């Protein structure tokens, strides 16, 4: 009933689980400012490994986006010209792109103390807003084809990406520090 009074956008969420050998250890998220704040607060990997939000203009992104990245090297590599051109062209349709080797889902509540390290997976998550505010047309869905191509491009890019020696050491240190806290 509430959607009839004020329609809300449908969202397409794509989750890709990567094979362990095909993704280096990093956490990165590109999202609209509002979504980035929510994800940073609720997702365990983002709140643990990405303590600060980076300005979008540093990466050539539109102003309504925020970048959360464990290491600058990762954001610089993932946000290449091809990705940036799709983001700029479909700015209204992209809610978030979340890449993580430490994805364990939403954070546990503050009052519950975990007894063991959560099980993590190497995951790519894409959240796209479907145009039409609840009245989705075939044309609108067809128009999202470049976003699906972006998903496949990112899968291949992550698979081919290798951290530098220094970044790999930093990544390993970060994961070891989190392990020691449990």
Image (spheres, grey):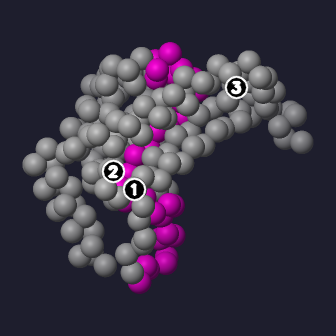
Q: Which residues are magenta?
A: 86-115
Q: Earlier in the sequence, mark 3 or mark 1?
A: 1
Quadrant assignment for the C terminus = bottom left
The reply to whether the C-beta atoms of the residues labelled 1 and 2 are less than 8 Å apart is yes
Q: Earlier in the sequence, mark 2 or mark 3?
A: 2
Mark 2 residue element? helix
- Closer to the observer: label 2 or label 3? 2
The reply to whether the C-beta atoms of the residues labelled 3 and 1 are less than 8 Å apart is no
Q: Where residue 142 sits: x, y (%)?
A: 68, 22
Residue 105 is inside the magenta segment: yes
- Closer to the observer: label 3 or label 1? 1
Q: Where residue 99 sits: x, y (%)?
A: 40, 46
Query: In percent of the image, x 21 and y 55: which residue is there?
Result: 171
Count of picture labels? 3
Image side of residue 138 versus residue 82, left or right: right
Mark 1 residue element? loop
Q: Is residue 15 above or below residue 82?
A: below
Query: In percent of the image, x 40 and y 25: which residue is there?
Result: 83
| CA distance separating discs 3 and 1 | 29 Å
Residue 153 is inside the magenta segment: no
Which residue in the protein does label 2 denote? 22
Any part of residue 105 in sight: yes
Which residue in the protein does label 1 denote? 19
Q: Where residue 58 sits: x, y (%)?
A: 27, 25
Any part of residue 38 in sight: no
Q: Nearer the viewer, residue 119 or 50?
A: 119
Query: In percent of the image, x 29 and y 36: which residue is there?
Result: 75
Mark 3 residue element? helix
Which residue in the protein does label 3 denote? 141
Q: Is residue 55 above or below residue 68?
A: above
Q: Quadrant of residue 117?
A: bottom left
Q: Where residue 26 sits: x, y (%)?
A: 29, 50
């Amino acid at each position: 009933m509430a959607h009839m009074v004020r329609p809300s956008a449908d969202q397409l969420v794509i989750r890709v689980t990567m094979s362990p050998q095909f993704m280096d250890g990093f956490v990165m998220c590109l999202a609209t400012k509002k979504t980035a704040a929510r994800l940073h607060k609720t997702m365990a990997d983002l709140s643990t490994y990405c303590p600060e939000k980076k300005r979008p203009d540093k990466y050539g992104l539109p102003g309504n986006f925020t970048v959360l990245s464990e290491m600058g090297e990762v954001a610089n590599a993932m946000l290449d010209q091809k990705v940036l051109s799709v983001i700029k062209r479909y700015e209204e349709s992209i809610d978030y792109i979340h890449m993580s080797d430490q994805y364990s889902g939403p954070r546990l509540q503050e009052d519950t103390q975990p007894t063991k390290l959560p099980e993590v997976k190497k995951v790519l998550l894409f959240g796209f807003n479907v145009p039409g505010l609840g009245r989705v047309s075939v044309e609108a869905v067809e128009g999202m084809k470049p976003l699906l191509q972006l998903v496949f491009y990112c899968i291949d890019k992550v698979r081919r990406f290798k951290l530098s020696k220094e970044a790999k050491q930093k990544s390993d240190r970060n994961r070891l520090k989190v392990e020691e806290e449990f």
